[in-house]
Structures are given as C-alpha cells and as structure tokens.
Amino acid sequence: MRYAVVSDIHGNLEALDAVLADVAGRADAILCLGDVVGYGADPRACIERLAERAQVITAGNHEHAVAGLLDLDWFNPYARAAAEWTRERLDDDHRSYLAALPLVAQVDDATLVHASPDHPEEWEYLVSAEDGFQAFAAFTTRLCFVGHSHVPGVWSLGSTGPTWLPGAVEVDLEHGRRYLVNVGSVGQPRDRDSRAAYALWSVEDGAVAIRRVPYDVDAARRKIVAGGLPQYLADRLAWGA
Ligand code: ZN
C-alpha cells in the first residue's frame, strides 16, 4: 500500500489540484490531516475534492473555527478574517461535515492528527527537536503523521538514539525505530519554498518521502485578492512563508 499524506490545503485549489495530479500513479490512497479550509479562495471546492478522494480526513483548527467549535479569539487577525470569510461561503452541510471530522485517526500502523498527538484539541505546534521527541509518548503506532506548522520534517526515536531531520527529506524506515513526520503544507508552505508539500508513504518499501510540487501561485494569489481576503494572504504564498 502506498499512501499520499496531505495537510494544510487552506482553500488553495491550484495547489491541491497540482498535488492530486502528482499523486496519481504514485499512491493508492490519500490521507488528509486537516486545515482543508482557511486563508485561500476555494474552500468549497477543496472540501468537495477531498471528501471524494481522501480515505480519512482529520480535523484541523481551521475546520473547528469555521464550524464554530473553536473561539476565533484564538486566531491572529489574518486567520480570523479568513475564518469569517470562509464561514460565510460555506453552507450548513459543509459546516456540519467539517464539525464531524475526527481529531485523530489510525490507518495501518500510523496515527494521523493535525497538530500534536498529545491533546490534539490544544493545537500545539511541533517545531523544535524537543517538541517532536516529547510527542512520541502520546501515540502507540510506529508512525505518526502531523501537519499544522506548515514545515516538513521527520523525528525518530530508536535504540541508536533520537534523530531530527528538518526540511524536505526521504527516510528509509529502520526496523525498531518509530517516526513522527510533519508532511508540510499543500496550500501555504512556510519554509521559504513556495512549492506545495506532501508526503508519500510506502508501507511495502518502508519509506517516507516529502515531495514538492510547483503550482500556479499567481492564480491562487489573484483569487485571494479578488475575493476580498487580506493581500498578505496572497503575498505569503509567493514567499513560501
Ligand atoms: Zn494550517
């Protein structure tokens, strides 16, 4: 089995479609870690694409914000403006669909969660080496896939000691080691690389690879501005930050 693990699409249909095209022929199933909406101009289309294509979708903080499960005071002004904009453009069916998504799921020997497996509803960011190592106690599977920070990276624990590989990586899964993988962001990368990011996980090959996919950034930016969302949300797509 080969899985594509996607996260943090954020209403960016140009990035999502580029990733889905890249996934074709490379993966047998799609797993989604949430934040399908928020920031980008196409929340409805992104929800509908993934509802149709993904085997599992876990909820992100932006799903909870749009569905009314998370107080918008939690958000910075840009995220709040985007959540309010997105909420107005979804109907009750979309909002109740988002509200019903699970916080955590398990597929094969992997835990799927948007933020941290440790109290996922607190939406903690796993950024540093230490953040990741501490999170291993909160899942029992061999692998755990997360998103939320929009920065890809792989933490691993095993008898030969902990490792932390920030950035885009390919990892051969070693016997006796456990892994925590941040798959990066499809629709709003923040590692100074504007290309969409997602992870390919091959169970048979015992390998995880972060792939980067170019997409039409200018088209996504134009739609954000034309839709009346903050200009900053368009500009940061070009910066990859
Ligand atoms: Zn996000």
Image (cartoon, rainbow, N blue to C red):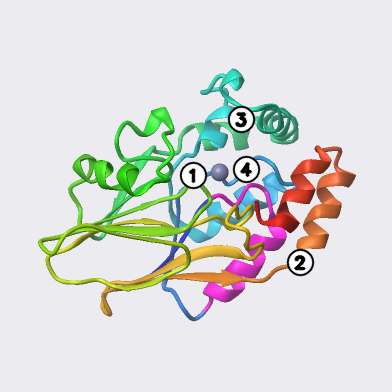
Q: In the shown orientation, is residue 126 left or right of residue 177?
A: right
Magenta-drawn stretch, dominant element (helix, strand or loop): helix
Q: Secondary structure at mark 2?
A: loop
How far across and how far down the image is residue 173, in percent?
Answer: 25, 71
Q: Earlier in the sequence, mark 4 or mark 2?
A: 4
Magenta highlight on residue 57? no
Q: Pointer 1: what residue? A: 148
Q: Say what amino acid the circle numbered 4 marks.
A: Val
User: Given contact means CB atoms under 8 Å apart, are the residues at marks 4 and 3 in contact?
Assistant: yes
Which residue corresponds to mark 2?
216
Q: Quadrant of the N terminus?
A: bottom left
Q: Which of the 4 quarters of the picture holds residue 218?
A: bottom right
Q: Is mark 2 within 8 Å of ligand 1?
A: no
Please name which of the two marks, 1 or 3, marks the residue nearer to the observer: 1
Rendered view: 237 above or below 120: below
Q: Which of labels 4 and 2 is toward the front?
A: 2
C-alpha distance separating marks 1 and 4: 12 Å
Which circle's residue, 1 or 3, is located before the other in the chain? Answer: 3
In the picture of the structure, the residue carrying the numbered disc 3 is: 66
Which amino acid type is marked by label 3? Val
Distance of label 3 from label 2 (alpha carbons):
26 Å
Q: Are marks 4 and 2 in contact (CB under 8 Å)?
A: no
